[in-house]
Image: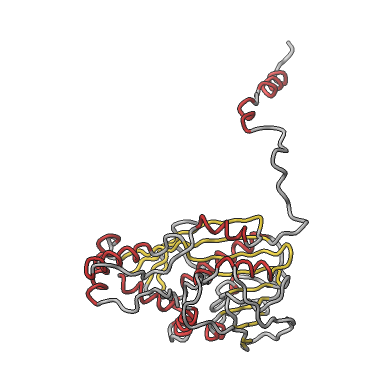
Amino acid sequence: MNKLMNGVCLGHGVLFRVTAGFIVPHRNITHLNLTSGNKVYSHVRNVSGGPAGAMNVFDRNMKRKQKKWAAILPDSDKYDYLRDEVGSRVADRIYDIARSFPLALDLGCGKSHIAEHLSKDIVERLFLTDISDDSLRQKRQSEMPTHCVLADEEFLPFQENTFDLVVSSLSLHWINDLPGALHQIHQVLKPDGVFVGAMVGGETLYELRCSLQLAELEREGGFSPHISPYTAVTDLGNLLGQAGFNLLTVDVDEIQVHYPGMFEILCDLQGMGESNCAWNRKALLHRDTILAAAAVYKEMYGNEDGSVPATFDILFMIGWKPHESQAKPVKRGSATRSFGDLSKISRTPTANKTDKSSTSVS
């Protein structure tokens, strides 16, 4: 499934695999007999332009503009290497489920980086949603019929119990209310439906974060957050459980991309539409600070060949909407044996049986 091999150069980077709430309902889509093609159905809710409430961490309007700017770049495809790689890994996990899905939904699909890896035998019909209409218009070719819906991942415009499968790749880390978004995903799934997602988390871009902080502290006497806050893998399972999912699977892949220098990292992040959009971000960096950060980056993390690594922790999650047909854990205390008894198991009967079978009569 994966199209990238270790050390393939794309854009400015060379990719290396290190390891294998509050819901505001609005206009619902009640009929799903839309025609496929390049038409984009718009169902985006207007989001406030300023911070309001404890959960409002990101400026979603700014993120929409960043994704629009990235999508209309003449050479935008060369910045898709990370999304293509993660999309293929999400598709691999869908194939592992070994069942077909009549109707599926892709949240924050971008240029449909998951759909191009799926076959119509697995997904018969797919809805693509994104906050950027320019990204939707550049969707990749796929085997199954697709329908584009311009919608915000924080306000899903679909009825409950609609989809057999919901997928998402590298989109949920920009959600303000992640618990609320997971709850909405749970709602739109049919019973026994499955959610397969991937998001940036953990210590992603820790090299860039540390270099910027050290340089800004030395040059300006303090530092501001320049890298978006990310969800920890230890919290993700709890969030999925609170949203109502069961049979949970959460794992982490660490992906390293090697670049000529720090400036190429910043350029590629902008080309991906992954620039920071937190409300408390600092608008500008002083020239001296950013030059010092580039020097710190190369000194602390540089490779012998002069390149520098950027680490992305990708959190993969699978959760099922409960159904009576699913396997259920037995009640606590119903076991007839304890783990302490395992050490008391004797191999003597087996050994005796072997001895008897090998005895000969003279």
Q: Outermost residue, bottom direction?
A: 39
Decide if residue 1 is in sight here: no
Position of 297 with respect to 232 (left or right) is left
Q: Count the labels in the image.
A: 0
Identify which residue is drawn at 55% across, 67% down: 178
Colouring used for the render:
secondary structure
Residue 82 or residue 29, whichever sits in front = 29
**Is residue 300 something one can see in this rendering?**
yes
Please identify the quarter of the rendering in which residue 78 is found: bottom left
Instruction: Give how far across and how far down residue 264 sits, in percent.
Output: 33, 74
Q: Residue at x 63, y 62 (%)?
A: 243
**Does 95 sit above or below residue 188?**
above
In the figure, 47 relative to 176: above or below? below
Q: Position of residue 28 (x, y in %)?
A: 69, 81
Horizontally, residue 102 falls left or right of residue 180, namely right
Q: Residue furthest right?
A: 324
- Name, please, the residue furthest toward the front: 53
Quarter occupied by the C terminus: top right
Q: Which residue is drawn at 27% across and 73% down?
A: 290
Q: Where is residue 281 in the image (x, y as percent from the top left)?
A: 38, 74
Which quarter of the rendering shows the N terminus?
bottom right
Residue at image point 62% right, 56% down: 248
Nearest the viewer among 218 and 342 is: 218
